[in-house]
């Protein structure tokens, strides 16, 4: 078995994390990870935290110096948009397609093989490892692990959070915030013509559905487009539907049903005043002037990716990315926007208070060591900022120096997600070399 075979097995586990449908990864995939490691002589245990599973363990002796971490849970799929079976790894040329192939099961497989190789070497310190199953829903298990290590004085000096792409060390990443806005139905009858329009996502440069990668001015968000339609007309909304998958996954399509006033029309149609206001409010919400604590290449991004209707209330969830620790400015700014557009809306500000953001100085010996190894392996030696948030944000506030890292690939959170096979096969040895050097720092 090689790393591609292992990835194929991991992709076959449908470890979708979808709170809207009550879906969570079962114990099956972590049990497979544990048994595979055990067959290589590596002991580990499966822990459970709030219904999510993780595989944790250590190799080597002495104080913890390095920790490696990756996640095996994945975002939902919209099968109609896939050209391949999402949960069966399909290799074409140098690309291996499958949900989780690059985010993040390619990293899980690579780290497992790296641990296998490290187990046979004399190590100059202890290496901790964790494979978690809830990163895509906030990473509560990573926080739990970080706090336990902190309480027992076992925090590592360095963390390689294997949750990145491009074979480039990610040294900065924004924190993710979530906001849910809801309004009750407000039905009324109005005269006009019933019409329907479907808006589609457009990502002409980077093919992805990951909210953190969405770039206003380049990409087109279907729900923002629907909002602008209502803002520029006197149409009234009847219903909203679309490929809503998750709060950090941009929907591929959004269908708006509305009534268009038409002179001389006598037929009456039921519309929803509050749904109309909610959709109209999307444009000012995503343009809210939120301030950040530190600079980010990506600035502050706000995307409206989840809509739900339970028969009584309409709910809209925003994904917000900012280089900030808390949501005080986010709350005050959005409340001001809502006071003008939806004064009666209920707002739930979700905030992972113990999470930080990733901000590691590229001049750190840790980062320079990673860059040196990459250069020796013919890779581009450059530290960058990544768009999305990751579980490293739970370790950095505790003083752990961290990077996010991973193989080359594309279509993160989108249809036809893939990892580059040549990059994947190189990755275990790169991890081994990096860890070896870090243990000597």
Image (spheres, helix red, strand yellow):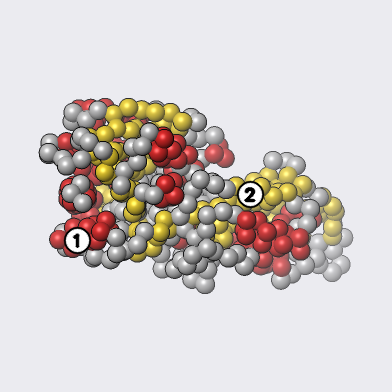
- Residue 217 is situated, as x and y percent measured from the top left of the image, at 52, 72
Q: Determine whether the residue tagged by mark 1 lies in a helix, strand or loop.
A: helix
Residue 36 appears at what percent x and percent y? 24, 30
Q: Which mark is residue 349?
A: 2
**31 in relation to 310, above or below:** above
Dot 2 or dot 1, earlier in sequence? 2
Viewer-closest of 351 and 5: 351
Give the residue at x 40% y 59%: 359
Residue at 60% across, 64% down: 290
The furthest residue to the front? 153
| Residue at point 87%, 60% (across, down) | 266
Q: Nearer the viewer, residue 288 or 256?
A: 288
Whether residue 113 sits left or right of residue 147 in the image: it is left
In this view, 296 is above or below 139: below
Q: Is residue 260 left or right of residue 210?
A: right
Residue at 12% x, 39% y is 121
Mark yes or no: residue 209 visible: no
Q: Nearer the viewer, residue 437 or 376?
A: 437
Return the x and y of residue 315 as percentages of the image width and height: 67, 48
Question: How far apart are labels 2 and 1 at the CA level?
Answer: 42 Å
Q: Which residue is mark 1?
A: 372
Query: Along the horizontal axis of the image, is 209 left or right of 107?
Result: right
């Amino acid at each position: 078995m090689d790393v591609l075979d292992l990835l194929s097995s991991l992709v076959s586990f449908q470890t979708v994390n979808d709170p809207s449908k009550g879906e969570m990864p079962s114990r099956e995939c972590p049990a497979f990870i544990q048994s595979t490691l055990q067959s290589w002589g590596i002991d580990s245990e499966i822990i459970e935290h709030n219904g999510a599973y993780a595989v944790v363990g250590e190799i080597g002796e002495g104080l913890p110096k390095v920790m490696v971490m990756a996640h095996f849970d994945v975002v939902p799929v919209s099968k109609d948009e896939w050209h391949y079976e999402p949960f069966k790894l399909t290799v074409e040329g140098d690309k291996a397609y499958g949900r989780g192939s690059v985010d993040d099961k390619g990293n899980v497989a690579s780290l497992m093989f790296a641990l296998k190789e490290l187990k046979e070497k004399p190590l100059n310190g202890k290496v901790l490892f964790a494979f978690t199953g809830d990163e895509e829903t906030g990473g509560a298990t990573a926080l739990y692990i970080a706090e336990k290590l902190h309480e027992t004085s076992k925090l590592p000096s360095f963390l390689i959070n294997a949750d990145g792409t491009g074979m480039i060390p990610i040294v900065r990443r924004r924190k993710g915030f979530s906001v849910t806005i809801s309004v009750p139905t407000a039905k009324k009858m109005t005269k006009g013509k019933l019409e329907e329009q479907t808006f589609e996502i457009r990502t002409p440069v980077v093919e992805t559905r990951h909210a953190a990668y969405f770039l206003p001015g380049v990409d087109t968000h279907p729900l923002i487009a629907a909002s602008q339609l209502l803002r520029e007309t006197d149409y009234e909304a009847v219903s909203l539907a679309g490929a809503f998958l998750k709060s950090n996954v941009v929907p591929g399509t959004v269908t708006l049903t509305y009534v268009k006033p038409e002179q001389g029309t006598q037929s009456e149609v039921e519309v929803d005043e509050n749904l109309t206001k909610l959709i109209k409010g999307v444009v000012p919400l995503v343009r809210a002037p939120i301030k950040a604590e530190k600079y980010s290449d990506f600035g502050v991004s706000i995307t409206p990716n989840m809509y739900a209707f339970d028969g009584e209330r309409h709910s809209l969830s925003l994904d917000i990315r900012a280089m900030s620790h808390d949501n005080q400015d986010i709350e005050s700014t959005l409340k001001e926007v809502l006071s003008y557009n939806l004064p009666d809306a209920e707002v739930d500000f979700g905030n992972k208070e113990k999470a930080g953001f990733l901000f590691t100085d590229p001049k750190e010996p840790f980062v320079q060591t990673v860059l040196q190894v990459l250069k020796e392996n013919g890779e581009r030696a450059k530290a960058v900022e990544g768009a999305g948030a990751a579980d490293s944000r739970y370790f950095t506030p505790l003083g752990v120096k961290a990077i996010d890292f991973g193989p080359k690939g594309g279509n993160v959170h989108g249809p036809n997600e893939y990892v580059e096979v040549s990059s994947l096969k190189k990755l275990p040895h790169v991890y081994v070399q990096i860890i070896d050097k870090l243990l000597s720092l």
